[in-house]
Image (cartoon, rainbow, N blue to C red):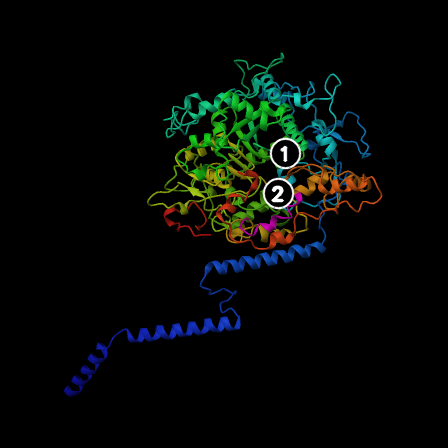
Amino acid sequence: MLVKAVVVKAQARRVLARPRTILPTIAVILLLCLLGWIHQERISSGVPFLKGGASLDRDPDERREKELAAQRALFEEEYHQLKDKPGYKAIYGNTLDTLIDGNTRSASEEEQLGPAVNNTIYSFTKTRPVTFSPYPKYNNPEWNAFHAPYVPCIGPTGKKVEDIGVFKGRPRNFPNPGFGSYNVLGLDRNLCFERDTRLGPYGLLPVLNADGDQVDWDSVQWGDLQDQCVERNKARFASHGPENEYVPETQSGDLKRGTSAVEDTSDDKEPVMYTLKRFWRKAGKKTSHRNTVKTTRRAHNMTTRVEPRTALLLRSFSGKTYTENDKQVIRSLVTELSLRSGGEFKVFLFVHVKDSDQDIWTEEAYQEALDKHVPAEFRGMAVLWNEPAVDRMYPRLSPKARKVHHGQFLPVQMFMQEFREFDHVWNWEMDSRIIGHNYDVLAKLGDFAKKQPRRGLWERNERYYIPSFHGSYDSQFRASVETAVGRETIWGAPSVPVVTPLGPKPPVPNPEDDDYKWGVGEEADLIELAPIWDPVNSGWVMRNSVWGYRSPTFPWGRLPRRATIITQSRLSRRLVDIMHYEDLRGNHVASEMAAQTTALLHGLKAVYAPMPVFFDRGWSGARLARWFNGGPRGQSGSFGSAMGWGQEGRYMGSTWYFRAYPPQRLYNNWMGYEDTEIGGDEWEAEHGRPCLPAMILHPVKEIKPTIYSSWRQARQTSPGPDSSSLPSPPTSAGTAASYFSRPPSPSPSQKQSIDSDRGEASHPPLTRQTSASHWPSLGSR
C-alpha cells in the first residue's frame, strides 16, 4: 500500500506541474476560429448573424452611414407615397372664397374684433374685414389699478395709429399644424390674413397723411416716432435698468463698465463700450421731440408696477438691398409692436458692417455707413456694429469663435450691456415673416412661456409637440414625457466643475415634491420656436463647436449642451448678462447653442413655445414623431436626428426651417405672385384672393414679382402675335432629389456656410442623479 501511495503522489505531482495555460489557450483558439467562420459565413451569405441585423463591420463610421442611408431611403419612399394621399399640397391655394368657422371663437377672442375697416369695399371679395386689436384693454378700471395710463401714439400719417383688418374664418381645406398648436398658445386659428388688409397701411397700397397727401416714406423717421411714443408713456416704464451683477464694473457695459478687464487698450483707444455708447445712443436723437407731445408722469406715491420692455433686433448687414416688401414688413413691426403698444417694444435695425477693414467709429464714417447701407426712413432706428468691436470686447475668445457665424449673439450681448432699460431682447431674422398680427403672435409666445412650470420643462423642450400624436399639451403630453424619461430629469442647474451656476435653485430637492408650481408666473429667460435639443451624437455639424469650458480634469467634450436651429429667439437681460460673463472668461459655444447651453448650465428658465408648423403632405402624427422625435425617450436629438448632416431633407416640406421650400412659395402666392402654377392675377381671378392663418414662415427671401409672373407678363405684353422668341417658363428651383441624396461630410468651409443668412460626443442623459465625474468623454459624432 505504501508503494501505491508513493506512485499516485508522483503522478499527481507531474500533472500539476504541467503548464496551466495550455487548456485556456486551446479554448481561445477554438473560439476565435468559430467566430471567424461565422463572420465569413455572414459575409458570404449576406445574412446578419445577430438578432436585429447588427453589423460586425470593423468601421463604425461605415456602419452608421449605412443606417443613415437606410433612414433616408425610407423617408424618401414615404415622402413620395404621400403625393397620392389626402393632404398633399393642402397648404397651397387657399383663398377668401373658402372660409369656414367665421364665428367660431371664444368670448375673449371675439372681444378683440371690431367693426369693419373704414367701411372700405374691396373689389376682390364680398366679405368685409373687421378690425383686429389684440392689445390689452388700456385704461379700463382693471388696467388703471396696476398700470400708469396708456397714451396713444402718432404714426407716419400724423394721426393716431389704427388697427389692421382681418377676415373672420379659416380656409376649408387648410390642414391642422403638424407641430405646435393655436389653442395651446392662445392664438385664434379662425382668422385669415390677406395682403391688402395686412400690409396696405404700410405701403402695399397708397397711404394718405392727415392732410390728404400720399405719405412720402423716405421722409418718415421711425426712430423719432418710437422715441416720441415712449416719451408719451414714460410713466409706464423704467428709464434705466440694473447693472450687470455678474461682471465687475470694469468689465462691461456703460460708462461705469466701459472696458473689459482683458481688453487691450495699449493703442490708446477708448474702451469699446464708450465708443459704442457715443454712436448707439445718438441714433434717432437729432430731431426727437421737436413737437410738443402729451406725456404721462409717474407720481411719487404711485403703486402701479413698472411694465417690462422688449427690444427687437432686426438682423441686417451692409450691402443688403431692401425690397419694398422688406420695408413694408419693417414698418408693420414698428407700428404694431412699438407705436400701437405705447412703447412696450422698440424695434432696431441691427446692421453688421461686414468690411472689417472699414473703420466706422468716427462721426463721418458712421454717418457715411448709415447713408450707404440703411434706407432713409430707418436710419434713426439703426444700430451699426462690426467684428473689430466684438474682437476688442471679447479678446479671450479665439478669432473663429468671435466671427458672426459662431458668435451671432456677441453683438447682442454688447447691445444689452448698453441698453439696460430693456428686460428682454428678440434676435429676429430678416428672412422670417409673420403671417398674422405681430403683437398678437409675440405676446402670446411670451404669455405661454410665462405660464410653464419648470418641472419636466427641459424634457418637454427637447421634442416637437405633435398634437395628433401627443394629445393635450398640459395633461397627455406632459404625462407621456414624464413616463418616457422616468427619473432622468433635469432639476435646476447640473453639476459641472467648470461652471458656477448663477440662476435660482429649485425650491425642493426633488421634482416629485413640486406640484408644478415652480416657474409658473416666471418670465422665461429664453423662448425658442423649435425644440431645445441635445446635439451630442446627432451628426449636426456644429455640435462640437465649444471653446473654453474645460480644465485639466474636465475635458470640454463632457460639457452638456442644448441647441435650437434658427436663432430667432427671445432672451432675458439676465440670460444675456450671464452669456456676456461667460464669454469674457473665454467660454463659448456655437450660435445655435449659445443661449440654450447657458440657460441649461446656469439653471435658467428656457421654453420651446410650440408655434404652429405645417407640412405640404398629410403626415400622420406617428410618422412625424418617428422622423422628428426619433431619439431616445422620444427626443429630437441623438443619432439619426433630423438636424444631422444629410438628414435635413425631412424639413423640405415644412413651413419653418432654413432648408424648407413652402415658406417662399406660400409667401409669393400670398403676395400675389405666381409660384409653381399657383398665384398671380389670372389665378386669383379664377380662384380668389389668397389668405392664410397666423404662422411664422422661414426662410422668405427677396420678395418681388417672381420669375413666373415676369415670364407671363412678358408674354402678355409682347408686341406681336408670335412670342416664340420669349423664354419658356422656368421650372421649380428645387427638387426632392437634391435633398434626399446624401451629401459628403462637410468641409470646414461648408461648415462656415451652413446658414447662409448669417454670411455670417456622447454623454448619458443629464439628470439630477448624474454627476460630471460619471460622464464619458465625447465621441466624434
Mark toward the start of the polypeptide (1 vs 2): 1
Mark 1 and mark 2: Cα distance apart in space: 15 Å
Q: 10 Å neighbourhood of mark 2: few (<14), some, or many (≥20)?
A: many
Residue 28, x across and y down, in percent:
35, 72
Q: Which residue: 64% across, 52% down? A: 736
Q: Give the residue at the far right of this rendering.
A: 721
Left or right: 360 as drawn, with respect to 618: left
**Kind of residue at disc 2:** Trp
Q: Which residue is mark 1?
A: 441
Residue 548, x across and y down, in percent:
39, 40
Q: Give the residue at the far top of this rendering.
A: 292
Q: Which residue is mark 2?
A: 656
**Which residue is nearer to you in this view: 415 or 635?**
415
Left or right: 527 as drawn, with respect to 652: left
**Which residue is nearer to you in this view: 616 or 128?**
616
Asked if residue 307 can be seen in this view, the reply is: no
Q: 10 Å neighbourhood of mark 1: few (<14), some, or many (≥20)?
A: many
**Up-down: is 385 above or below 641?**
above
Mark 1 element type: helix
The magenta region covers 643-662
**Which residue is nearer to you in this view: 282 or 428?**
282
Mark 2 element type: loop
**Up-down: is 572 above or below 95?**
above
Give the number of the disc on residue 246: none
Residue 416 on the magenta segment: no
Left or right: 339 as drawn, with respect to 50: right
Q: Main secondary structure of the magenta part?
A: loop
Instruction: Point out the image quarter for the N terminus.
Output: bottom left
**Kind of residue at disc 1:** Val
